[in-house]
Amino acid sequence: MLFRSSSLDLLPLYSALATIYSLPPELLCRILELCTEDYSLSSAIALSNRYTCLRSASLVSRSWQAPAQSVLWSAVRIYKRTTAQKWLACRVTGVYGTRHLELGGVHSKNEGVSAALAGKIVGRCVGVRELRLCDFGRLSAKVLQSESLAGASCHLPPSLLEWSLS
C-alpha cells in the first residue's frame, strides 16, 4: 500500500515555515546581532565573514533585507581613504544607526583617513555609542564636537588623551 499525504497534512508544516519569514524586525535584528557578535572588527577576515553572513541573511526574503542592513551598518570600520570616500558616497549612509565607529588615521605613511575626512564621517553617522580613533597624529577637537557623538564613549590614542571631552 502506498502512503499518500493529503494537502491538509502539509498545512501545519507550511504554517511553521511561514512564521520564519514573518518575524518582527526587532526580533530578527537581535537574532542577527547574536549571529555576528563573535566577528571581531579588528580583523579584516572577520569583517569579511560578518559581511558574508549578513549578506546571506539579507537574501532570505525581502522582510530580512532591512534588518540585515541595519546590523551591517551598526559597526563600521574605516582605515583607508578610498573606503571612506565610498562610504560617504553610499546613499544609505546615515539611514541606519552606527553604534560602533572605528577610524584609522594618516600616520606613519599609512594611507588612512585624514582629520577632515574623519570629521565628515562622524558628522554623517547617527547614534554613535562607541568611537575608536587609531593612528591620528593630529586631530582637531571640532571632529569630536559632533552632535552624533553625544553620549558616545570615545577610545582615543595616547596622543589625544590629554584633551578633555566635555
Image (cartoon, rainbow, N blue to C red):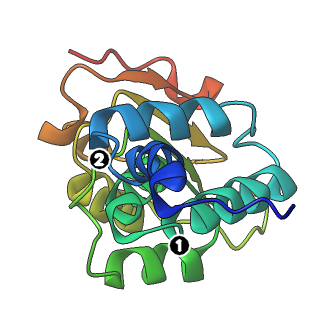
- The reply to whether residue 86 is in sight is yes
Nearer to the camera, 4 or 35 = 4
Which residue is found at the position 69% from the left and 53% from the top?
50
**Could you tell me residue 103's position as x and y percent?**
54, 51
Q: Is residue 119 left or right of residue 101?
A: left
Q: Nearer the viewer, mark 2 or mark 1?
A: 1
Q: Earlier in the sequence, mark 2 or mark 1?
A: 1
The residue positioned farthest toward the front in the image shown: 1
Hey, which quadrant is residue 109 in on the image? bottom right
- Mark 2, Cα crowd under 10 Å, few <14 / some 14-19 / many 20+, is some
**Could you tell me residue 120's position as x and y percent?**
28, 64
Q: Is residue 96 left or right of residue 16?
A: left
Tell me the amino acid under the disc marked 2: Val
Marker disc for residue 48 = none
Tell me the amino acid under the disc marked 1: Leu
Quadrant the N terminus occupies: bottom right
Nearer to the camera, 119 or 16 = 16
Nearer to the camera, 73 or 66 = 66
The residue positioned farthest toward the left in the image shown: 147
At numbered mark 2, what does the secondary structure look like: helix, strand or loop? helix
Which residue is found at the position 54% from the left and 65% from the top?
113
Q: Which residue is mark 2?
A: 143
Which residue is found at the position 32% from the left and 49% from the top?
22
Count of marks placed on residues = 2
**Could you tell me residue 44's position as x and y percent?**
81, 57
Quadrant the C terminus occupies: top left
Q: Is residue 15 above or below residue 80?
A: above
Which residue is found at the position 12% from the left and 38% from the top?
147
**Could you tell me residue 52's position as x and y percent?**
70, 65
Nearer to the camera, 62 or 32 = 62
Marker disc for residue 59 = 1
At numbered mark 1, what does the secondary structure look like: helix, strand or loop? loop
